[in-house]
Structures are given as C-alpha cells and as structure tokens.
Amino acid sequence: MKSDELFALLRRRGFLWPTAEIYGGAQGLYDYGPLGAALKRRIEEAWTAWFVGLSHDYYLIDPAEILPEAVVRASGHLENFTDPEVTCDSCHNAFRADTVLEKVRPEGVDGLGPNEIGELVRANHVKCPSCGSTNLSVPQPFNLMFGLDFGVTGRERVYLRPETAQSSYLSFARMWDVGRRALPLGIAVVGKAYRNEIAPRQVLFRMRSFTQAELQIFFDPTSFPVPFDRTKEEVLPVVRAAKRLAGSEEIEHVPAHDLVASGGLPEFYVHHLVHTFRFYRDVLAIPADRVRLLEKSDQERAFYNRIQFDVEVHLESLGGFKEIGALHYRGDYDLGRHGQGSGKDLAVTVTGGRSVLPHVLELTFGPDRSLWAVADTHLGKDGDRTLFRLPPYLAPVPVGVFPLIAKEHAAFALRLSDELATAGVPNQYDDAGTIGKRYARMDEAGTPFCVTVDGETVAEGPNQGTVTLRLRDSKAQERVPAAELAGRILPKLRPPRPPRA
Amino acid sequence: MKSDELFALLRRRGFLWPTAEIYGGAQGLYDYGPLGAALKRRIEEAWTAWFVGLSHDYYLIDPAEILPEAVVRASGHLENFTDPEVTCDSCHNAFRADTVLEKVRPEGVDGLGPNEIGELVRANHVKCPSCGSTNLSVPQPFNLMFGLDFGVTGRERVYLRPETAQSSYLSFARMWDVGRRALPLGIAVVGKAYRNEIAPRQVLFRMRSFTQAELQIFFDPTSFPVPFDRTKEEVLPVVRAAKRLAGSEEIEHVPAHDLVASGGLPEFYVHHLVHTFRFYRDVLAIPADRVRLLEKSDQERAFYNRIQFDVEVHLESLGGFKEIGALHYRGDYDLGRHGQGSGKDLAVTVTGGRSVLPHVLELTFGPDRSLWAVADTHLGKDGDRTLFRLPPYLAPVPVGVFPLIAKEHAAFALRLSDELATAGVPNQYDDAGTIGKRYARMDEAGTPFCVTVDGETVAEGPNQGTVTLRLRDSKAQERVPAAELAGRILPKLRPPRPPRA
C-alpha cells in the first residue's frame, strides 16, 4: 500500500489519527486510538521482554521527560542539536535545508556547513517551495529542542528531552548504588522524546512527540563478556561503510563470527547486532529480506559514536529502506560529559579495585516507526479480504467473541468474554452485523482468533459448552470447549524472549 | 512513617529519586527506578482492568500530550487555569497565595479574588517566606500551563496538556465514527499531564510532570442505565457538602441506594462512586477506614462540574486526608466548548433519531499519588523487618529466585528464573549475601513469593526438582515442585476486574 492508503486504513479502523483532528490537526502529532494504543503497547512490551531480558542486570526505569538546562548543555544538545534551516525572505516561511535541496542533492546535507549549503542553494537557483521566489536565506542552525519556562520566576529554563538516552545517563550513579554495583549494567527507558522538527512528514516517521525504546548498556571497556556462542553463527544482512564509500549499497550476507574475525568489529557489538536483527525478524516478524544493517561512516555518525549500524526496513509505503532502530557504541562520551557537567565523578570501582568510567553501548528503537513498519509489512489485501497478519502476541485484540444471534447467545458470549478477560486474554465482544462482517472487522484489526457462540453451545447435546474457534490466517474453523480457550490461547500471547540460562 | 523517612526508603531501594539528581534535582520532577516504574505500571494496569473493564464500550487510547492553542482557549485553560501568585518586591521571589496565607487561612484561597487575597496579606502583615520583608505584591493570576513554540516560524503556540481529559474530548468524534455509534461511550487515557506548579511539594503529590488515569464516559443525559443492583447495597464513607458547609467534616456511612433515594444524587453517579470506592479498597487494598468520599460545594468545584466527590485517603506521611482521585459530572460543558472552538458540531444522533450533545462523567485518578498512598499504607516495620505488603498483582517483582549456594545451585536457579519469565511471571534472580539478607531485600521490594534452590533440588531423591517457596507476609515455607510454580503464581498476578456479565 502507498503511504496515504495505509494511513487512511489505519485511521478508518481507529489505529491512529492526527492530534486535535477536529481543529484541523497539529503538524507532526498523532493520537493512537484503541487498536493503535494496544498495538504500540505490545510492541513496547515485546521490545522490553527481548532486550531487558538479555541479562539479569538490565532494568527498565521511567524517568521524567523534562531536563534542566545544565543537562542539555553538558550533553551538547543545547549547542549542537540543530538542523540547518533556510528561510524565504519573500514569504518568511522556513524549511529544512535538506528538504529544499532534495532534488539537487538527494543524499542529504549531513556534514555540510551553512556556507556550503548556501552555495548549493544559490548555484542551483533553488526556489522557495512555498512562494517560488529565489530569495532563500543563508542557512541558520535551528535547535530542535522544545524549551520551557520552569517555575514562576521566568529565570529557569528546562527542555523536553530530545532522546530518552539522557535520562539513563543521569540515572547511572543512582542505579549503581541501588543495584549489584557490577558491570555491565543496563538501563532501559521506553518513553516520550520531543523534537521540534522543521518538516514533520511520513506520518509516524518524523513526529514532534514520539516514543523511544532505548537500552543503554554500561560496560567496562577492558572486558564486556558475551555468550557469543549463541549468536556467532547468525548470518547478518550488512552494508559496510567502506563499501558504501566505494559506491556500493549492496547487502552482503556475513556470518557474525566473520564480522569479528575479519570485519574489525568487537565481539560484544556483533553479539548485540545479532540480537537486534533477530528482534526484527523473529519478534516483529519482518521478513529477513526486508531488513538491512547499514553501517554509518565516520562522516555520517555523531563524533562520539565509535561504531554505528542503523537497522533499516524496506517499506512499500515509503518507497524504500527506512531507519527504525540503531546500535551505537558511544564510548565514554556520555558519562564523561555528565561527570563534568554535574561535578560528580561518574567513574565506578570494579572488582579488583580498578576505577572505570563505563563505556556505553546504546540499542535504540522507534516504537512508532516500528508500528508503521509492522502495518506496512503485515497489513494488506488477500483477495477480497483485508488482513492484518500480526503475530498473536502483537495483536491489539487477540480474541473476538461473537454471539451468532444476539438475542439467543449474548448471555453466554458476554460471560465468556468476561471469563477470558479475567484469565488474562484481552478480547472484544461484537454482536453487530453478520458473522462475515464481524470476521472482516477483526481481520483488519489483526485479531488471530474469533470465537462464535451458537445454538449448539447453549443447547443440551454433545456440543454443549463448545464454541467455534476460527483462525484469521487460514480461516480454519474448529469446535472447541469454551472452557479450554484461555489455556490454548494464553501461551501464544507472550512475546518471545531470548534464552538466558 | 513521616514523609521524609518514606521518601528516603523509597529512594534507597530505587523506587524513585529526583530527576537529574546528580545535577541537584529539578523541582517537582521525579524519576521512577526499576521497582517504582514496575509498581506504577501495575497500578495503571489495575486501574485500566477495573475501570475500562466496566463496559464493552469503554476504550483506552494513547493521544499526544501537546495541544494546539485553539484547544486550550476553547477549554478555558488559557484564561482560567491559574493560581494566584504573590511576588516579593524586595527579593523578587514568587509564591502561591495559599501557601503564603497557610497560617492565617488554612482552608485555602479557593473562591477569593485577587483583591480579597491582597487584603488578607496586608491585614495580617504576612511576611515573605524567603526574605522576611512585608513587601508582598497584590496577587496576580499565574497560568500553570507550559507553553511551547511549535514549528520554525515562532508564530505557532502549543501547550503541554494540563489534564489528559482534553485529549479524550478531542477524540470523541473520531471514536464515535470508528465504534458502535452508541452511548454511553467511554474513552480512557493513562498518560502525562504537565503543570508549572508555583510550589511543588509533598513529593509525588504536586509534581510538574505527572501521570493521570482518566475515564471520560459520554452519555445521553436522558438515559444512562447502570446495573445498580450490583452496587446499591454498598455502604459508602461520605462527607456531604451541606454538612461541611454547616461545619461538620465527619464521615457518614451511607448505603448507596440511600444516596439516590434521599441523598439527591443520580443513580449513574452513585453507581460509579461505588466502583471507585471499591477500586481503592478492593484493588489497591487501602483499608476502608482510611478512605473518604468528600463532596465539593458549589463554591469549591469548577463551575462546569455539577457534582464532584473527591476520593481522599488518610496518609500518615502527609498528616491527614489527601485527594488521590475524583468523580466529576461535567454536563455538556466539554463537548459544547470544543464544538464551538472547532466549528464541528459534536452532537450525535442516537437510536430514535434524536440529536444529543453527550454529557460527561469523568473518573479521574492519580497513579503517582496512588503509588505514594500504597507505599504509605503498605510499607512499614514489622518488628525487625521492613515489609511492603503489596497485593501480588501490584508487586513490582512478584518472585525472587535464589540459589542457596551460588556455585552449586546457580544453573538450576537461572534456568528457573528464565522459565518463569517465559511463562509470564516477572522475577528477580539474586545470589548475593545470605538467604536472610535476600529475603529482607525482597520484603522491602514488596515481593510476595521467594523461591530458593538448594541441595535437595539438584540431588537425586524424593525432593529432586522441588524448591522452597517462602511467603512474604507469613514467612511460611513450603516445598514445591519447581514445575508447578508458574501455574500456582500466575493467577495471583492478575488484578481484580469488576464482573460485567
């Protein structure tokens, strides 16, 4: 599906819609409706089960989204978290430089200075996208953070966090104290981040308020032992930076152990790259041939990132590979900066009495983008049907419960719906329209199991107490005792976890 | 426990700490650590199961926290969401008028105008709490919303929502379209709200970034049928507004049906008041004698609230009854205002062809405050032990898994921890220190079940494969097959739901 078509379908089914829609919406803001909120929650829970589940010393925390100015000064965001912005001297509208230059420089403007961008605008006689004049200004850096006046004096300035990672760095000292005081220590946050994007677009891909799921692993740079035996045989679809610089974007399929042995990457990094790849393939069920791990070059990555692979998924709706996650080896930049900024030494003493300023491996992930990617991948036509082929543990509503005839079967069906909910099986009761229409509604919602209560269920006889269980993907139907439903379905609702022991 | 002592304990155990603690914190902002994040999440899930579980037509959505200016203009927040603020002309610090006047007017300043407040300050020679001078200004209204510059032009103004309710009102039209198109329709949000409180205090009770769980029930004012049979016999601890105005704050214990028959309250309102009371008593397990339902008078409630009872819980740490929830009958104020503001008629056509502008019953709830209330109520000393007597479904970590001797029993214990997690039982593996110390750590964390793997578990014999299950509250121990643990514990981890069918 094209982006517009996919969005229209998601909106019609109440997955999501523009914020303050009745007021005409707000650029870069979306509300999740019942199905979207549940799907996003399940994606977040699957992420947490998978990545926080990697170690007994990885923890999920929930910090505030507001950061004092001293924090974003130390992190560098106050100075550097900018996009080049071009304004039109005729109509006074403002644009991202890379958007204005899209046609003449499709590879973007990363690494170019304001003067170089200005020269490109002039040399190519680039016109204002709004009024068509050529009076575009020399680019200015535009800070993407939202600032707030905090307190009553007007003297205190705070910021909505531009990334959840900062909250984890700020919490490291406290987490060290309350935990086992050992490395590696993982601190995960699933929460909001905010960016005043110059040009929000592509629905969930460039939002101004969005969710991040990030795991920061703090480790001793002299030793980050990982059970590489469990991952080294995996073959990864990589695009190496050196090949890209030489002009090739072709995916190579390389065994993990080769990336270490001859690929120049550390074992701990490749181990987590495998886990990340497996999450997209085995948990979100994105077909492996739609995923690539794209290494960023020195010029492309932030200076503090020593190694960076972006996880990109090929999306039909957006016409190509799009980033939905990444793996950053950030060195000791973060704790070093916040140590300086706060005046508190963030080095810790490890076994043997050595003092270590931990390095950070960051696994970063976009639940909103992933929701879109999952919809792009799994939601589509199958003949006459519109079908959302979600794995059961991602389905917003795993079970639909229908009385065949509302008047006769509602009492049993309502009780069953209630019993399933009490047993931990979320479900939707629906008595409106034909069974076929009800199946169709649940197919679009991604519901893998539909249950129909009929005359046989409530009448005395061999089928008393049984219901029809219908499977979404195969349309297969089966007669099942209602009392056995929860036991059959519950195990399928737990997201996969990586084996630890 | 006193507030300071309770906070110190919660901080030491990593439930929560001030945001950006290494920078000295930020007023009114707190981060939840691993135990606090999990406890808060479970409180939110219990709330959702209970209240969204009230009807098949109540839904949870997840809208953005940022609202365009037109929205808060229509809702009245731009004009009226203010606290009177007094500034000191000597030291230029600012204070909430009710704080400054606390000693001379303990009942607060609700309903007083700026001139009346100014007169009280002058007449009582009130001194600046900061510098001691008597140069306090005439009070000015201070808007508590955080405003943001949105987009690149600097011309667009948006606001962090001051309450989640607005997001539900904005979504009503879309939810009507995607749903059954029938009333009552419930729209719940569990999410952040933001208020630039003049004087943040009492830890989680007046924060600048906090979570609200709110259910807005849209109904036809001519008919809101409820199954009152299920609730009418409940005896509620109420303090009626009329009695309060007459000088009595005494709790009366009144059967729900009496509140309707002779108390002048509508059935639908009392029905939901009972469900709300039961939530605090039966789900959060707050002793009934610590809860009161305090009716607000005409002078105290917002003008659009026709009926308001606050749910207050007596907290030792804060020295009295504190509001942690409320039930507002808001009439058609909200949809009326947003209909005008947006230019979209929000009336709907109900069965029979009548056009109805739905009324709103709002159930509002503070997860942060409730977390504090639960800690105040359930966390305390029992002889030498510090014990957090949480119901199992609220416990951040329901199960602790210990090897008696790490070297000998770790392999089995790690595998068990992993199997429990896979079966949906969150647990913490701990091999540090004596078993007694490990029990003590889990007692403080509120963990109801601890499991120890020992020599008998791993040796051939009658107890092979069994572990010691130790219960938090009774300290009772029992030998249990490890394979049976998940089945025994899982049902206890589901929060109670109200019966529907």
Image (tube, coloured by chain):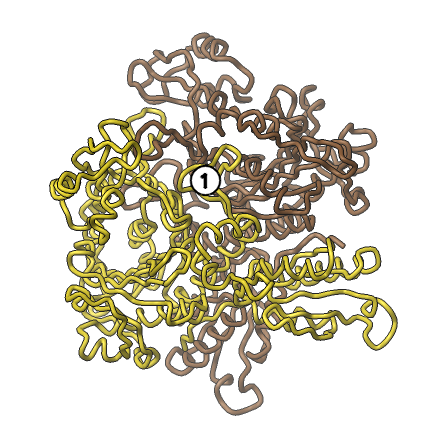
Chain colours: A yellow, B brown
- What residue is pinned by disc 1? B65
- Amino acid residing under circle 1: Glu
Give the image location of residue A96, x and y in percent. Answer: 26, 41
Is residue B405 visible to us here? yes
Observer-nearest of B94 and B292? B94
Q: Check the residue under mark 1 and report the chain it is in.
A: B
Is residue B384 visible to us here? no
Check the picture and name the quadrant holding the C terminus of chain A.
Answer: bottom left
Q: Is residue A285 above or below residue B191?
A: below
Give the image location of residue B363, x and y in percent. Answer: 62, 39
Residue found farthest to the right: A460
Q: Is residue A322 above or below residue B270?
A: below
Residue drawn 38% across and 12% down?
Answer: B137
Residue drawn 43% across and 59% down?
Answer: A373
Report which quarter residue A68 is drawn in.
top left
Whether residue A477 sits left or right of residue B17 in the image: it is right
Give the image location of residue B88, x and y in percent. Answer: 34, 16
Report which quarter residue B187 is drawn in.
top right
